[in-house]
Image (cartoon, grey):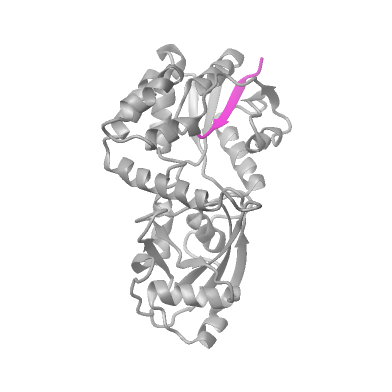
């Protein structure tokens, strides 16, 4: 026995395999902490539900007597396992007594479960797979249906889905978000199918531009799926005969009509960072090179949306932290990397001043 059992997952959505593991945790300890990952991601076909909606699914599937024993710890994606592990440890420490005996309940389903070995000092309770369902199968059935046919599409899976989750899925399919995500789901399937015959999985190279001026940041809203309507940094795919620098300038001009001289941008360039987490993009393996420019107190350049951008606008730095769930893929993480927007482990929180 341990004092506290930890169960980590995304629960997109909750199914009976999840609930069997949660029951194992409840059988092991009086206190259970469920770490809900991808907590502040914008809705997407991979992460269609908010962390609050997923918490409601989990609690609704529990017997009432057990609900008070379960605490939910929402956890953002850091796209860096060491930082993520430290954040989980810190979150658990806030919810447990000093010296508590902690156990980690989980199942090694594939390479994505390697994190289970990243918590030395916690007793690892490896549990065999519970049930024959996975969340991806449920999402594919959900988005492969229509609002009128979703009930029938989910019926073959109903025995593996808690009744309250099934009700939540039926309700979700009647909401505007459902149709938008369904369009994106179809686009992503078609996109990946285009490359299915390649002799090896393709790796895409992109660029992004973070422009800061007068403590504001230039953002766009995406005009097309994936991420239609979400906020992002200007950027895109590199052309075959371009350098990274040339591609960055071209994408910036195409999407925002930003027209400062190249020499001015070279002087303003502060940092180039590579973002290469294997799961950062649902389009496939995509490595981006983010260019961070600081124009200081220069006049704010005029911008106008075009090409793949629905809108181009300057946003005050102080507004960005509250917009985390409005960003495409890992673009908030990129902003956080350069501008210190969150109190991520390993660095101080900066409130009124931002690094140059």
Q: What's the residue at 28%, 34% (across, down)?
A: 147
Where in the figure is residue 74, as x and y percent of width and height?
A: 49, 37
Specify the farthest residue to the front.
Answer: 197
Specify the segment rendered in magenta: 1-10
| On screen, residue 181 above or below 172 | below
In the image, residue 156 sits, relative to residue 240, either above or below, namely above
Give the quarter of the figure containing the N terminus.
top right
Q: Residue at x 35, y 76 (%)?
A: 303
Viewer-proximal residue, 135 or 331?
135
Image coordinates of residue 243 in percent, x first then y, are 60, 76
Q: Image quadrant of residue 154?
A: top left
Residue 28 visible in the displayed image:
yes
Most common SS among magenta residues? strand
Instruction: Examine the structure image and report whether residue 8 is included in the region drawn in magenta.
Output: yes
Q: Where is residue 130 in the image (x, y as percent from the top left)?
A: 57, 19
Front position in the image: 287 or 63 = 287
Horizontally, is 199 left or right of 342 in the view? right
Side of 190 relative to 280 (left or right): left
The verdict on residue 217 being magenta is no
Image coords of residue 355 (percent x, y): 55, 67
Assign the C terminus to one quadrant of the image: bottom right
Q: How many marks?
A: 0
Q: What residue appears at the point 36 percent right and 61 percent down from the top-left corner? A: 221
Does any portion of residue 30 appear in the rendered image? no
Q: In the figure, is residue 183 to the left or right of 261?
A: left
């Amino acid at each position: 026995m341990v004092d506290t059992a930890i169960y980590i997952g995304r629960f997109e959505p909750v199914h009976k395999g999840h609930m069997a593991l949660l029951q194992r945790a409840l059988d092991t300890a009086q206190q259970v902490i469920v770490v809900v990952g991808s907590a502040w991601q914008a809705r997407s076909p991979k992460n269609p539900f908010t962390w609050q909606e997923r918490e409601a699914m989990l609690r609704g599937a529990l017997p009432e007597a057990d609900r008070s024993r379960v605490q939910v710890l929402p956890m953002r994606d850091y796209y860096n396992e060491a930082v993520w592990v430290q954040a989980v440890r810190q979150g658990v420490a806030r919810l447990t007594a000093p010296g508590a005996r902690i156990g980690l309940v989980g199942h090694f389903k594939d390479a994505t479960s390697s994190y289970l070995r990243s918590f030395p000092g916690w007793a690892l309770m490896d549990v065999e797979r519970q049930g024959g369902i996975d969340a991806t199968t449920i999402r594919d059935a959900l988005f492969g249906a229509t609002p009128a046919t979703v009930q029938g599409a989910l019926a073959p899976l109903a025995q593996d889905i808690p009744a309250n989750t099934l009700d939540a899925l039926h309700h979700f399919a009647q909401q505007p978000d459902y149709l938008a995500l369904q369009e994106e789901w179809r686009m992503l399937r078609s996109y990946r199918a285009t490359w299915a015959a390649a002799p090896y999985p393709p790796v895409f190279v992109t660029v992004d531009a973070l422009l800061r001026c007068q403590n504001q940041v230039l953002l766009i809203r995406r005009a097309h799926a994936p991420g239609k309507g979400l906020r992002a940094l200007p950027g895109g795919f590199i052309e075959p005969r371009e350098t990274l620098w040339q591609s960055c300038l071209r994408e910036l001009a195409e999407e925002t009509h930003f027209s400062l001289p190249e020499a001015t941008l070279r002087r303003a360039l502060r940092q180039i960072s590579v973002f290469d987490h294997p799961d950062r993009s649902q389009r496939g393996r995509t490595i981006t090179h983010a260019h961070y420019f600081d124009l200081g107190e220069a006049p704010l350049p005029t911008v106008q949306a075009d090409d793949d951008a629905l809108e181009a606008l300057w946003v005050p730095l102080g507004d960005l932290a509250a917009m985390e769930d409005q960003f495409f893929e890992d673009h908030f993480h990129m902003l956080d990397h350069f501008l210190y927007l969150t109190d991520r482990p390993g660095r101080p929180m900066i409130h009124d001043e931002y690094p140059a």
